[in-house]
Amino acid sequence: MIFHFPCRHLTIHRVLLLSHLLLVVCLVGVMSYARYESEWSNKLRYFVELSKGSFTPHLNDISRLLTEQQYSKLTSAKILEHLNAVDKLKFLDISSGEQQSPVHIQFVRASEYLGIVDANQTMNVQSPSDWNTNVLESQYKLDKSGHALHLYLPLSNPGHGRIWAVFNASSVMEYRQTLIRSLLLEAVSAIFLSMLVALYVTRRVVGPIKSLAKNMSSSEPPSMELLPELARHDEIGQLAKAYKSLLVKNYDQLRQLQAQNDTDTLTGIGSRYKYSRVATDFIERALKQQKCVGMFVCDIDYFKPYNDYYGHKEGDRALVAVAKGIQQTLAAGDMVFRFGGEEFLVLLARPKKSGLQYAGEMLRESIEKLNIPHNALQGCGVVTISVGGAYACLKRMSLDELGAKKILDMLFEDADKSLYQSKEQGRNRFILSAQSIQ
């Protein structure tokens, strides 16, 4: 069976946050526990030593009285006065330690006064028989639920007696609760602050990477000036600069490829690919400027016989010369394309239809005036072209209704018909369609 861990599907941002959180929780937990153990142990040890110290002045006297079996003096007013002076003492059991008949003298604090326990009085404390060996060896036991410290002190009498004292440990337990609350508050604050730092760091590291990734996956070419990561001097900045270098190189290659595709390799004018890419925008832009837009389809007359007679090399030279002649005749902003073989297509815009008529006639005459010899057929003399034109003078409403793409298709269809008429009427002619595209 193959197990798939959820972290495989986490983003870098979440992985960084979760790993940082786990590390911080472990570190804070270990440090807080170590501090708790240290401070609590010191506090408890101090309380135990303080409690032991309160009995140290009386141990020799109590041992002597037990040895001399002067038990009545152990319950005298003087002893009671000394015992009542011991701070926080709740219960006291003095044992002679004899095997056969051990003597137990017990005192308990009732209200604020420590008194002797009667035989019939029930004690609300742990009995000495409940102590285990570990407690005897450690000499004290803290009852956390009862807030009491059980203290074991050996005596120096021959029977090896001992004192069992119970102290009120409420202050120590309050200190413990305060310590726990303080450590928890500090731990939560440390985790919260560390998460803020982690958020800032991940935002500074992952944010730019996501931004770069978004730019890489965008269908639109990103603007290099809009990449703030370029101003950074760290690894992210280096990555952004490398990305920019790669984009610039790719864009240069794309521009070169586009320029190659846009340019007819023989004549140097626009290719059919460029026509399909820019013609619609040209039509829409011209019509929005309230101009009459025209399309001329030009075809070199009797070009196949010319190629057969002069050869393909001279045919190519004729194509280049005709393309250059057309280009030089047109105004700035007009566009010319080699549409295929000996056929050329011209897009132009003029304020009125008469301007289109004049441009078409000048185009035809300019090629005839090149005086390129054409003796392949009797009666040709020089290379000429037949030109068929169509035009559209539309208002904005008509443009929105028809759409530039449909208008372009209609112009080409009408211009092709006009070209056919030009050839039918003897070639070396320019015929403009009688009606505008409606």
Image: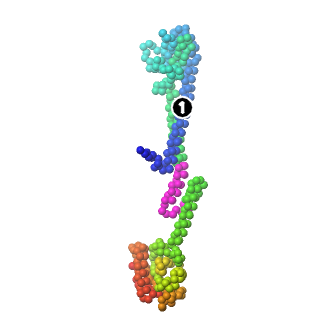
In the rendered view, tell whether residue 366 sits above or below residue 19. below
The quarter in which the N terminus is drawn is top left
Toward the right, the furthest residue is 233
Rendered image quadrant of residue 437: bottom left
Residue 240 in the image: state x and y as whole percent: 56, 57
Q: Nearer the viewer, residue 238 or 260?
A: 260
Q: Is residue 339 visible?
A: yes
Q: Amino acid at mark 1?
A: Glu
Q: Residue at x 54, y 60 (%)?
A: 226
Q: Nearer the viewer, residue 377 or 47?
A: 377
* Dominant SS in magenta: helix
Q: Which region shows up in magenta?
A: 200-226
Toward the bottom, the furthest residue is 379
In the rendered view, tell whether residue 225 sits above or below residue 355. above
Please say which color scheme the image uses. rainbow
Residue 101 in the image: state x and y as whole percent: 48, 9
Residue 253 in the image: state x and y as whole percent: 54, 66
Residue 13 in the image: state x and y as whole percent: 50, 50
The quarter in which the C terminus is drawn is bottom left
Q: Secondary structure at mark 1?
A: helix
Q: Residue at x 46, y 19 (%)?
A: 130
Q: Is residue 282 visible?
A: no
In the rendered view, tell whether residue 237 sits above or below residue 168. below
The stretch drawn in magenta includes residue 149: no
Q: Residue at x 53, y 54 (%)?
A: 209
Structural crowding at the residue carrying mark 1, measured as other residues with C-alpha within 10 Å and reported as few (<14), some (14–19) or many (≥20) = few
Total labels drawn: 1
Q: Residue at x 45, y 13 (%)?
A: 118
Give the residue pinned by disc 1: 37
